[in-house]
Amino acid sequence: MSGAGLTETVLRVGLVGPLPPPFGGMANQTLQLSDLLAHAGVQVRQVQVNAPYRPLWVGRVPVLRALFRLIPYLVTLWRVAGHSDVMHIMANSGWSWHLYAAPAVWIARFRAVPAVVNYRGGEAEAFLTRSSRLIRCTMDRVAILAVPSGFLRDVFAHFGMGADVVPNIINVSRFRNNDATEDAMRMPRRRLLVARNLEKIYDNETAIRAFAKVRACYPEATLTIAGSGPEGKTLRQLADDLGLASSVVFGGRLKPSTMAELYRNVDIAINPSLVDNMPNSVLEALASGVPVVTTNVGGVPYMVRDGQTALLVPPRSPEAMAEAIIRLIEDSELSKRLIENGLQEVRNYTWASVWPLWADVYQRAIAQPQRLTKRVR
């Protein structure tokens, strides 16, 4: 059945996940999916896992804040599940799974509503290794497991769980650059961007060290880091120690509209992460006509091809990253090829391509509400 056919009787979806603020990967995807489903004629009821604390002072008290958020969350889950045809649960690794995703699955089960788990954590393999038995107990109550990449599908298959691949969605009306191909042929291309949070797993340190090597060759080069996190102070100190304070801008975490404008004003996007699934920042760069240098980790090689849609480098290698960046600075034909291929590739992540996949997932989940997650032999 097509997406249009599925909504003839007004499909009701309970959407469980984080919402901005702060603006970030899963929160942005949840908000975007909610809006797109609504425009497709789906009745969406949201259950926010990161709702503001009430009263605000509760957020400063560790144990108390968990209770003040969890109890209203469970009550809302119960109510929304009772008015939904299917529960769409955005899931991640660690405590996020145990506190929010797993309870949503069990409440859906108690309310006899099929649950679709949309798992998107790049650290899934380590998490499943530690807690596979406990996770399996919950996953056996799930109608369909959906993941955004072939990488995560293969990870879950290793633990005996089958998954449907439904990619992330990129808003090509927001992330765009109509002059990208022409811009690729101009010189210089020396404005660099990292759009990852300031956390150890995203290894912004390597990006800064690589930039130091690039700037030794091209003193006018600049680097903008758009993100926030616990490593901010350390990274600023590193930039200062390397003599880069005047050429590295820490922009903080930005709204999607501001990020879209930023992409249109940079030349090369860098993804230095150590762990990844399907980084939205890479998709946003491709859609914006910005060539990408990225580490070859996790699900990244499932979404881009080295030398065709991006340049792939090993993690924790400032030398290899700097060499790839300099290639793009010096080779306009290479930049043009990556841009053109990236713009073509990103069409697979538009709503027009992804909505039929979600419509099919919902249809199958509703048709077999008691179906367990398929096992891989």
Image: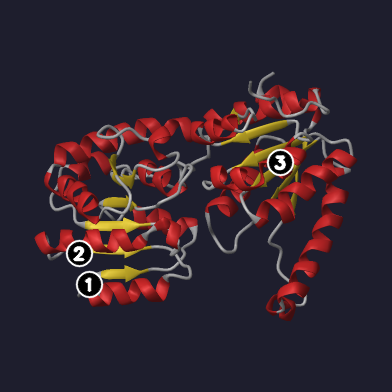
Residue 46 higher or lower than 162, as above or below: below
Distance, label 2 to label 3, CA atoms, is 46 Å
Out of 310 and 333, give the one closest to the viewer. Answer: 310
Distance, label 1 to label 2, CA atoms, is 7 Å
Sequence-wise, the earlier of marks 1 and 2 is 2
Q: Position of residue 117 (x, y in %)?
A: 69, 39
Task: Say whether residue 347 is left or right of residue 208.
Answer: right
Please name which of the two marks, 2 or 3, marks the residue nearer to the observer.
3
SS at mark 2 in the image: helix
According to the image, what is the colour scheme of the structure? secondary structure
Q: Mark 2: which amino acid?
A: Ala
Query: Which residue is under mark 3?
Result: 133
Task: Say whether residue 159 is left or right of residue 372.
Answer: left
Residue 88 higher or lower than 9, as above or below: below
Marks 2 and 1: in contact by CB < 8 Å? Answer: yes
Distance, label 1 to label 3, CA atoms, is 48 Å
Out of 90 and 335, give the one closest to the viewer. Answer: 90
Q: Residue at x 63, y 34 (%)?
A: 146
Query: Which residue is under mark 2?
Result: 212
Residue 63 higher or lower than 312, as above or below: below
Q: Position of residue 55 (x, y in %)?
A: 77, 77
SS at mark 3 in the image: helix
Q: Mark 3: which amino acid?
A: Arg
Q: Position of residue 123 (x, y in %)?
A: 53, 48
Residue 30 higher or lower than 374, as above or below: below
